[in-house]
Amino acid sequence: MTTEARTDTLLPEALLAAAQRVIDANRAAGRKVSVAESCTGGLVTAALSEIVGSSDVLEAGLVTYSNEAKQELLGVSQDVLETFGAVSVAVAWAMARGAISRTRADTAVAITGIAGPGGGSEKKPVGTVVFARAVRGGDPDDITADMRNFGDLGRGGVRLQAALFALDLLMPDSTGP
């Protein structure tokens, strides 16, 4: 399937092209995907669902912006949130594992970060985003996660870069960050 220029969308073409690749590759592999999003606020799920026929591949998109939502919808423990903070490898991994356990997806990617303009710190500046990828049947002790700093690109820029990175992680041949 080819990506055609779309005039009925608000999403950037680069994001739609990446989503098209994810849908096509996972459809060919017979795989389903889920996304657990925090700082991207559903942008990855929106891009995937913009693709015609995405229901063949997209199992679920869970926007868990608050810590309470991360706990209730994904099973992230309060202890992990308090010990490591919402923007951490531990929380991203727990989010990805929660998405796998609560959906029928073969692969789940989680995204949590600081899009700005405020909220950053010296250790975790604006533009810091953490990703995790969980695979159904994978070893729960084999953590696939990475922290990236995209820089202070503005809120929209950070969210776009995070969404593009997350889409790469949803490719069936991805080995992770």
Image: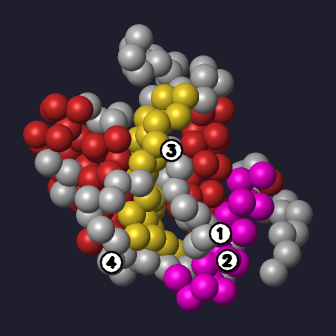
Which residue: 81% across, 81% down? Answer: 1
Measured as percent of width and height from the top left, residue 9 is found at 74, 58
Name the main secondary structure of what is drawn in magenta: helix
Measured as percent of width and height from the top left, residue 63 is found at 39, 53
Seen in the picture, residue 159 relative to 143 is either above or below; the reply is above
Please say if the residues under marks 4 and 3 sit with CB atoms less than 8 Å apart: no
Q: Which residues are magenta?
A: 14-31
Which residue: 87% across, 69% down? Answer: 4
Question: Label 2 to label 1, Cα distance in Å?
Answer: 5 Å
Question: Label 3 to label 2, Cα distance in Å?
Answer: 23 Å
Depth order, front residue of 50/134: 134
Please say if the residues under marks 2 and 1 sit with CB atoms less than 8 Å apart: yes
Seen in the picture, residue 129 relative to 165 is either above or below; the reply is above
| Labels 2 and 4: the sequence-earlier one | 2
**Residue carrying label 4:** 137
Residue 27 on the magenta span: yes
**Residue carrying label 1:** 22
* Amino acid type of the residue tagged 2 in the rendering: Ala
**Residue carrying label 2:** 25
In which quadrant of the rendered view does residue 167 lie? Answer: bottom right
View extreme (left): residue: 79
What label sits on residue 40 in the rendered view? 3
Which residue: 84% across, 63% down? Answer: 6
* Amino acid type of the residue tagged 4 in the rendering: Gly
Depth order, front residue of 105/89: 89
Counting other residues with Cα less than 10 Å from the Cα at mark 2, is it few (<14), some (14-19), or many (20 or more)?
some
In which quadrant of the rendered view does residue 23 lie? Answer: bottom right
Question: Label 4 to label 3, Cα distance in Å?
Answer: 26 Å
- Tell which tag, 3 or 2, sits nearer the viewer: 2
Counting other residues with Cα less than 10 Å from the Cα at mark 1, is it few (<14), some (14-19), or many (20 or more)?
many
View extreme (right): residue: 5
